[in-house]
Image (spheres, rainbow, N blue to C red):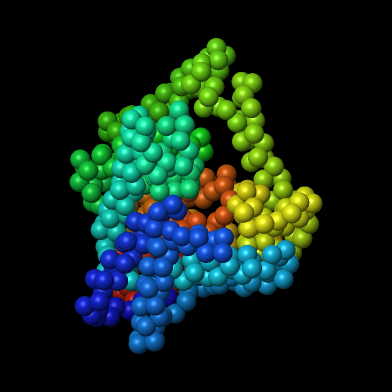
Amino acid sequence: MNLSLVRFNKGSAIINALIWFSILTASCDIVLAFEVAGLTVRISQLVSLAVMFFFLLRIIKFGNVKILTPYYNLLIVIVFNTICIVNSKTLFNAVGYDLWLMFDCVQVLAFTYFLSKQESIQSLVGKYIWCFNALAVVGFMQFALQFVGINFYVTQYNDLHRSNGFSFEPSFYATYMIMGSIICLYLLERRNYMCMRKSWLIVSTLLNVGAVVISTSRMGLLILLIYVVYRGVMCLRIYIHKRASLIRILFTLMPIMVGIAGVLFIIAVEFQVPFVMHYLSGLGIGGTASHSADARSAGFKDTWELFLSSPFLGCSLGGIDAGIIEYKSRTYTVANNGGASMCVSLEALAAYGIFGAFFFFKYLYDLTIGGYLKAKKRPGDKRDREPVYAMLIALFFEFVILQLNQNVLRPPFWVHIALVSTCLQIYLRESHKNYKTEYQEVTA
């Protein structure tokens, strides 16, 4: 996209405020949201529509917006998803999800266009962390108020005291908060305080990691654990070369601490410790019921079989659940949405077909691995790249956790894609003297 700099009018501050309000409320499923024909419409999405309208006006006025080759991958995905509607078992739902996909793709363009002109990488990442902090505080309020019998937008009210922020359920909340946790953990480990003062970064890390913990989401804790062990192994190399800070030493000790926790966990299961057994309920471990694990494994299997039944012509994103339910000889209703399929990668295969899914994965590859390689090759201080790396790593692990979930159209995921695109846009522009020539290489 050719994003040549233009002089903004007084409305630019309003546009910026609208964007950040949309980002702040992207995970709000049960407040600032309402139902329309079985679909949840969020205020954040309506605000994004206003931003897209201003984006359209910019295109009309300046006529200098060009779509890059990498972004064409998303456009091709839309084409495949639209074609596959003919193979969907529910036309209304298929069309609705197709429009939703188009919405998310245009949102990436609009947010990248405006934010790349109005924000630095440091201000963008700093504000983004504060958005996570706000939702983390909500989670802690929910957790604390449950001890005095107050249900503050809690969707799973039981003796385990689970927090869900303003998301549908704790696992959705953890899926959102894992991004903030990883961004903060990475910047703290690297001792990079360009986006936020050290004291506030420490507080933000505790808030975000704590929010994942009090959600008690097993998926969230698993991904957080994988990240910490991964960074611990990476820090071990630095420690061996005697260049370790206290924070890096702590990260290095994490694999050992995880190993000790694993031993304690096995002992707790062996002796049937009540709290541990209650937490394991649904996984089939230690003699507990396996309903949760069974549902997920069935979702994996059913989504894969739906893909195999028509590998070249998918059923579109909105037709996946209906296709699975019909395949299992059951009656489909809108209420079944979100409960039949599993794993966004398998959903991509089932929705777009094998060729459409290729372009979806290619876009994500170009944005993550490709974006990392482009940023790494640019001259300049490595510390300037670290906030970009934090955003890229968070996107990678968010995609990993979505392998244990359904529906790739979740608003926070696409908001993060837009902000990653913006960070790359700004960095590649500012790291080159003649930045105008670099606009042709940026992944939108």
**Left or right: 209 in relation to 342:** left
Q: Nearer the viewer, residue 176 or 440?
A: 176
Look at the picture and state if 343 lies above or below 285: below
x and y, in percent, of residue 236 in the image: 39, 31
x and y, in percent, of residue 68 in the image: 48, 74
Q: Nearer the viewer, residue 290 or 432?
A: 290
Q: Quadrant of the rendered structure where residue 146 is?
A: top left
Look at the picture and state if 435 lies above or below 136: below
The residue at 32%/52% (across/down) is: 131
Give the residue at the far front of this rendering.
149
x and y, in percent, of residue 431 in the image: 30, 64
x and y, in percent, of residue 96 in the image: 58, 67
Q: Is residue 80 visible?
A: no
Q: Is residue 434 visible?
A: yes
The residue at 26%/46% (across/down) is: 192
Q: Nearer the viewer, residue 171 or 60?
A: 171
